Amino acid sequence: MSKKVVLAYSGGLDTSIIISWLKENYGYEVICVAADLGQGKELDGLREKALNTGASKIYIEDLKEEFLTDFVWPTLKAGAVYEHKYLLGTATARPCIAKRLVEVAEMEGAEAIAHGCTGKGNDQVRFELTIKALNPDLKIIAPWRIWDIRSRNQAIEYAKERNIPLPVTKENAYSMDRNIWHLSHEGLDLEEPWNEPKNDLYHICTPPEEAPDAPTYVEVGFEAGIPVSVDGQTLDAVSLVTRLNELGAQNGVGIDDIVENRLVGMKSRGVYENPGGRILYTGHQELEYLCLDRDTLHYKEVVAARFAELVYYGQWYHRLRESLQAFVDETQKNVTGTVRIKLYKGNCTVAGSKSPYSLYSEEFATFNEDEVYNQKDAEGFINLFGLPMKVQAMLNKKVGQ
């Protein structure tokens, strides 16, 4: 009886040829696992394609709800954004997928898990660290680090020799990753940072200059840092993100173009479409301005940067990420309220916020006459707060600096 390998399968170029390669080189029975994270039409015909290409079985797993609630929401609550732009759409998806790969491998009695990530990218790390964290006994096979194929064009030729149907051509071979949270684009003309993305690149967002001339307003409700409603209607995670994706995309919101620092040491250029995510990050941040005290807010910004690195680096199941999550969850207990957001030609701006836990007090902040703040108190505060600077200045004067 052939030994089994579980393959992370998308039906794209790399995983399409890996089925044949695993059988030819290892004699494995190949069991495919495809995660439905909201790719839409990309899943059409996937079962037939996998079986016709040589897989013995395929699991198509609907993980959209788990992906959002267990991976995206914690990252959103942390305010984690990699290098100020990337909302971690692929980075949060990989541990979610890998978790299911391990579960299927254990269920099927497979000895190995294979993936189609290249040796230059981040995803190989994200998949493999998750596998190691959840089941260190599983063997990992990464064909791109082993075989003689060195380019996408060579991979396309390999597929043609074996009559494997492909969704790409040499002329239209952007590397894309899509889920309900985002769509990323890499490769081709984007490899030159001076090139502006062409408008026909976008699959989700309307180019901002083609968006409606009138703004759209949307109200997003949060409870303990988690988005729960749109325009007063309570929605489950999938429905909520789907609705915000529609609104954001119509108005050209959520396009990010970044030359980012990959974990493996090189820089890469990617264009991301993240309409719903941009709306949610904008709303969540605004609510924190309202509900978190200064020290907590400022320290949380430090945590957010480190949290983003851990997620980007594939360390979702690292003890530090889990520990920082505990801090984040504590900060979110009062991050409840509603934010009104204005969407207009690529811009996503706050148009109002309210919360039962707001720390903002008009009585204290007003420029009009008030009965709660004695301005004379500020003099003593400034004297004490500035005392170290005053002492330093006195010393400088004494020694003639």
Image (cartoon, rainbow, N blue to C red):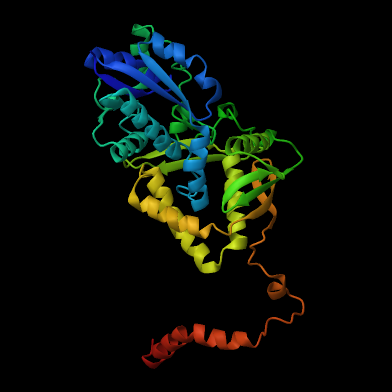
Percent x, y of residue 149: 29, 20
Snapshot quadrant of residue 259:
top left
Snapshot quadrant of residue 7:
top left
Percent x, y of residue 172: 48, 20
Residue shown at 38% from the left, 15% from the top: 57
Answer yes or no: is residue 87 visible.
no
Answer yes or no: is residue 371 visible.
yes
Percent x, y of residue 153: 37, 18
Q: Is residue 113 left or right of residue 349?
A: left
Task: Residue lying at the far bottom in this picture: please name it.
Answer: 398
Considering only vertical position in the picture, is 197 above or below 393? above
Snapshot quadrant of residue 141:
top left
Q: Is residue 79 left or right of residue 140?
A: right
Q: Quadrant of the N terminus?
A: top left
Percent x, y of residue 39: 52, 26
Q: Is residue 303 left or right of residue 124?
A: right
Residue shown at 73% from the left, 36% from the top: 212
Considering only vertical position in the picture, is 114 above or below 247? above
